Image (spheres, rainbow, N blue to C red):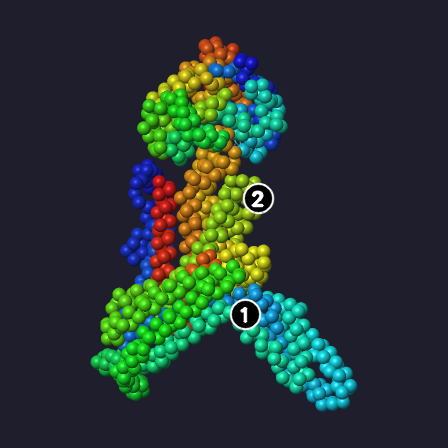
């Protein structure tokens, strides 16, 4: 089980009720407690696939799974008795543009627990501290927990979003280009954090930065036009890719 | 025409030119298309501002003369003694309110204890009139016969024909007639009817003599009501002396006031005419206006005899003389009332409603005592020569409790009844509109499918397109009746204010205005909700929140300031609405009686907008009444302006 936390089997996905497929038969096994990177040219469907994993695409009326299955922890997430809301409690997501709620830092982190009905103050306090420590933000914000989250710097806000996600202790964290809106120093901090989080969580990250992928990920999948071209350990992909396309892309020779 | 070499040259040198393009020149201005478009839009924008300024100036200019003008009228009212009469009247108004309550309690209690019995009398009286009208001939015929057997037989026939005739009078018509006398009556029981019928037959058979029982019923009831009846009797006439003093001061001082006031107005016209003549005379270029100046001179001659001498000294002596009797009369009223109140405290009260009324009236009695004492001391130091200050005039307008115009008595321009009326209606309207419109906005924005939103949104927004006069008429003709019918349903009697006494009332106006305010609040609130970044919603959903949690915990709080602004703008719309309130608020300029609690929503009120629309057409431009209406308009304008500017600040703060 450990090696196959998420299993995609011939997954097809369409934004227009099946007329055209954006994801065309992807088969992947994502192992637990590792960082898996999705790379590939713009528009190849990385974000789309990521959003399939927590069923965020359900919010789009015309979105449709055309074929295949996604299993997380052995359960088909599209089975009729699966509630997407319950699923999302275990599959958290961090977005490209940091988006903390216009609330206090504390309320942001406590949000996930509160909507699950947690009211006990000391439990919440504990969870907030744990999550903020876990996202390496505690020391910077511990004196201003009640101030607005929007007053933090961009990098801090993104780490707050990560803290908010890990507060509910999900199994999987999906990250869609989490550093693309950050400067190099903030990026370094978030990368460090991701490396830390790997011990407890399974992370799937979409990135456009080859360096980032090679620095932080254990495995890398290269996508092209909605298909997986190559999927292997990061080392293999970057040093010894089996496909010409992959090599072209990571060396920057891609058209 | 340029030749080729010219073209080539210009091409090479002027290929890149930073020079301003030439436009056409107009009156020294260098205009081009850009400038013209800019000027057009800019001109329109500034025109709007200019127009607003113009309205401000116009309002201020028209209203400004009111305060000194009202001061003059108040001073005239003081000199003529009306003010003294008003001091007495305050006590009488208090007395009336109190007496009404106690009397209501009495009627209620009587109805509860004797039920049908008291309806027998009015039913009988109706039947009696039928006997009088329709059966006269027949009865004559039958009573003239004197042979024993025949008489008996004909008496039977007579009874039969009375029954038939009275059956023709429908029960509903009968009930309506009786209701006018016994307002609490809601049904006519068969028993009471049968009993009244028997008495009516006796009346017919006994040569038109009212049966003794009928005349005894009221006395019997009153006797059995015991202490309660005595209390009401004690109270009933306690105000007589005071009322008489009031009437005599009022009668005399109103005449004096009218004379003084007319004299002043005539003098003012004369002064103005003289000034006009003078300016015409000193202008040498105006030969042909000699006819005009002659006409004006003639008018002055007409006006002069209208200024009549008046002996204010004699009048005021009379007023002071009457005032000297006031304290004794006021004390008498209070002490006799006290007797009644004491009796009332001891009297046996069985119904809860009466008990509540009596409890309330004991509070009102304390108030009456206070009012009486207050007015006593005010009258003691009342002095007809004390000058009226401008400030007095300002407070008399803003805090005045009466708006009374249109009679030849002293006109009163007190804003309070109108202001409270407008406020009350607006509050009731908001009470309905806010949950409705905000709820709808949240639903449409957060939960509705595209198709639902596709007809809900334009549907709600279409309400705005209904002309308010149409809505007002709909209110008067349909909703008013429905509401009254509903308020009379027994199972709704727990609603405060039900059953409604006035057909047109605060609640009705509030409901219709709520309907009108809905689209405003809905649209703005929906906008505010829509402006919440989708990233927040996404983040919340990705955390495993459901749609309801996301809507209530993220989207609504994030748009709260916008929603507040929407509510306030809705309020502004409601308080400024004219046509609907004019038609459905009932237009009674009196301060709503808040002692009824929420029941106040069943009362008729008048509004600031309504009064302007209603009275503007009837007044001559420039007179004080006209200026008073502009003052009301000014107040309204300032209220709307401040609401709007607060909203703008709220919205600006949000977008930061
Ligand atoms: N909500 C949507 N509705 C319809 N089509 C969409 C939607 N979102 C994305 N697409 C289309 O699906 C394809 C894949 O988009 P996706 O965002 O997954 O690409 P990506 O690999 O994440 O690209 P990038 O690296 O630029 O983020 C694109 O052609 C895009 O136009
Ligand atoms: Mg993407």
Which chain is home to disc 2?
B
Give x and y (percent) for residue A118. Answer: 47, 30
Secondary element at tag 1 = helix
Is B157 left, or right, of B16 in this rendering?
Answer: right
Is B177 left, or right, of B614 in this rendering?
Answer: right
- Circles 2 and 1 on the same subunit: yes
Q: Is residue B626 above or below residue B563?
A: below
> Image quadrant of residue A109?
top left
Residue where numbered disc 2 is placed: B452
Q: How many marks?
A: 2
Foreground: disc 2 or disc 1: 1
Is B170 left, or right, of A115 in this rendering?
Answer: right
At 72% from the left edge and 77% from the top edge, which residue is drawn?
B164
Q: Is residue B647 above or below residue B538?
A: below
At 57% from the left edge and 35% from the top edge, which residue is drawn?
A61
Q: Give whichever of A77, B148 is nearer the camera.
A: B148
Is B308 left, or right, of A105 in this rendering?
Answer: left
Q: Is residue B58 visible?
A: no
Mark pair 2, 1: CA separation: 66 Å
Which chain is home to disc 1?
B
Q: Give whichever of A46, B445 is nearer the camera.
A: B445
Q: Is residue A93 visible?
A: yes
Give x and y (percent) for residue B32. Answer: 34, 50
Residue where numbered disc 1 is placed: B224
Q: Check whether the beta carbons of the residues at disc 2 and disc 1 lie within 8 A of each other.
A: no
């Amino acid at each position: 089980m450990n090696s196959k936390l998420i299993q995609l089997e011939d997954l097809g996905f369409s934004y227009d009720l099946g007329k055209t497929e954006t994801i065309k038969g992807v088969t992947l096994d994502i192992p637990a407690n590792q960082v898996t990177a999705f790379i590939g040219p713009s528009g190849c469907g990385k974000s789309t696939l990521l959003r399939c994993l927590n069923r965020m695409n359900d919010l789009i009326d015309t979105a449709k799974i055309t074929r295949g299955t996604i299993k997380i922890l052995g359960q088909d997430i599209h089975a009729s008795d699966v509630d997407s809301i319950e699923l999302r409690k275990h599959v958290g997501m961090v977005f490209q543009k940091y988006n903390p709620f216009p609330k206090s830092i504390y309320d942001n982190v406590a949000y996930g627990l509160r909507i699950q009905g947690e009211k006990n103050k000391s439990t919440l306090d504990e969870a907030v501290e744990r999550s903020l420590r876990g996202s390496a933000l505690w020391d910077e914000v511990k004196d201003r927990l009640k101030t607005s989250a929007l007053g933090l710097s961009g990098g801090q806000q993104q780490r707050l979003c990560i803290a908010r996600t890990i507060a509910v202790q999900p199994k999987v964290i999906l990250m869609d280009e989490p550093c693309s809106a950050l400067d190099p120093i903030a990026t370094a901090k978030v990368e460090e954090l991701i490396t830390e989080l790997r011990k407890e969580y399974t992370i799937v990250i979409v990135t456009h930065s080859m360096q980032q992928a090679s620095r932080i990920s254990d495995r890398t999948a290269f996508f092209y036009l909605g298909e997986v071209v190559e999927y292997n350990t990061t080392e293999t992909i970057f040093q010894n890719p089996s496909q010409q396309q992959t090599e072209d892309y990571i060396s920057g020779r891609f058209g | 025409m340029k030749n080729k070499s010219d073209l080539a040259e210009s091409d090479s040198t002027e290929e890149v030119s930073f020079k301003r393009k030439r436009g056409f020149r107009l009156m020294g201005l260098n205009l081009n298309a850009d400038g013209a478009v800019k000027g057009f839009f800019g001109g329109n924008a500034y025109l709007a501002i200019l127009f607003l300024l113009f309205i401000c100036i116009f309002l201020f200019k028209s209203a400004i003369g009111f305060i000194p003008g009202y001061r003059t009228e108040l001073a005239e009212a003081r000199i003529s003694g009306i003010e003294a009469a008003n001091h007495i009247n305050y006590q009488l108004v208090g007395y009336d309110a109190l007496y009404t309550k106690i009397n209501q309690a009495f009627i209620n209690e009587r109805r509860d204890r004797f039920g049908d019995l008291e309806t027998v009398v009015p039913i009988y009286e109706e039947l009696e009139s039928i006997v009088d009208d329709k059966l006269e001939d027949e009865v004559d015929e039958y009573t003239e016969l004197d042979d024993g057997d025949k008489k008996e037989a004909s008496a039977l026939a007579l009874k039969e024909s009375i029954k038939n005739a009275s059956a023709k009078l429908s029960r509903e018509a009968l009930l309506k007639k009786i209701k006018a006398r016994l307002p609490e009556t809601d049904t006519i029981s068969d028993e009471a009817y049968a009993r009244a019928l028997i008495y009516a037959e006796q009346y017919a058979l006994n040569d038109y003599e009212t049966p003794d029982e009928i005349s005894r019923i009221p006395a019997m009831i009153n006797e059995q009501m015991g202490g309660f009846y005595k209390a009401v009797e004690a109270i009933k006439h306690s105000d007589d002396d005071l009322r008489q003093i009031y009437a005599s001061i009022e009668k005399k001082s109103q005449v004096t006031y009218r004379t003084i006031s007319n004299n002043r107005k005539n003098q003012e016209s004369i002064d103005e005419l003289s000034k006009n003549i003078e300016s015409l005379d000193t202008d040498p270029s105006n030969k042909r206006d000699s006819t005009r100046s002659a006409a004006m001179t003639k008018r002055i001659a007409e006006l002069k005899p209208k200024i009549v001498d008046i002996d204010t000294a004699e009048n005021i002596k009379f007023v002071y003389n009457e005032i000297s009797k006031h304290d004794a009369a006021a004390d008498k009223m209070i002490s006799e009332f006290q007797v009644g109140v004491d009796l009332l405290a001891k009297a046996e009260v069985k119904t809860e409603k009466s008990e509540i009324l009596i409890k309330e009236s004991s509070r009102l009695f304390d108030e009456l005592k206070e009012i009486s004492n207050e007015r006593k001391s005010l009258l003691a130091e009342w002095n007809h020569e004390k000058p009226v200050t401008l400030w007095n005039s300002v407070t008399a307008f803003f805090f005045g409790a009466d708006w009374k115009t249109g009679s030849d008595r002293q006109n009163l321009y007190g804003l309070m009844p109108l202001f409270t009326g407008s406020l009350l209606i607006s509050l009731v309207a908001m009470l309905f509109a806010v949950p409705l419109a905000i709820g709808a906005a949240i639903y449409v924005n957060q939960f509705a499918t595209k198709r639902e939103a596709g007809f809900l949104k334009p549907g709600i927004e279409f309400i705005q397109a209904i002309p308010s006069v149409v809505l007002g008429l709909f209110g008067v003709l349909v909703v008013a009746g429905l509401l009254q019918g509903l308020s009379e349903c027994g199972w709704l009697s727990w609603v405060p204010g039900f059953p409604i006494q006035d057909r047109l009332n605060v609640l009705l106006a509030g409901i219709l205005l709520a309907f009108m305010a809905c689209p405003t609040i809905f649209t703005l609130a929906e906008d505010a909700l829509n402006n919440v970044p989708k990233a927040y919603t996404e983040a919340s959903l990705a955390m495993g929140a459901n749609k309801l949690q996301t809507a209530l915990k993220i989207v609504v709080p994030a748009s709260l300031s916008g929603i507040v602004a929407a509510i306030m703008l809705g309020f502004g719309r409601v308080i400024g609405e004219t046509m609907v309130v004019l038609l459905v608020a009932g237009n009674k300029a009196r301060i709503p009686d808040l002692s009824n609690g929420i029941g106040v929503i069943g009362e008729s009120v008048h509004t600031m907008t309504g009064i302007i629309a209603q009275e503007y057409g009837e007044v001559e431009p420039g007179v004080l009444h006209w200026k008073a209406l502009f003052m009301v308009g000014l107040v309204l304008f300032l209220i709307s302006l401040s609401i709007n500017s607060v909203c703008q600040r709220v919205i600006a703060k949000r977008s930061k």
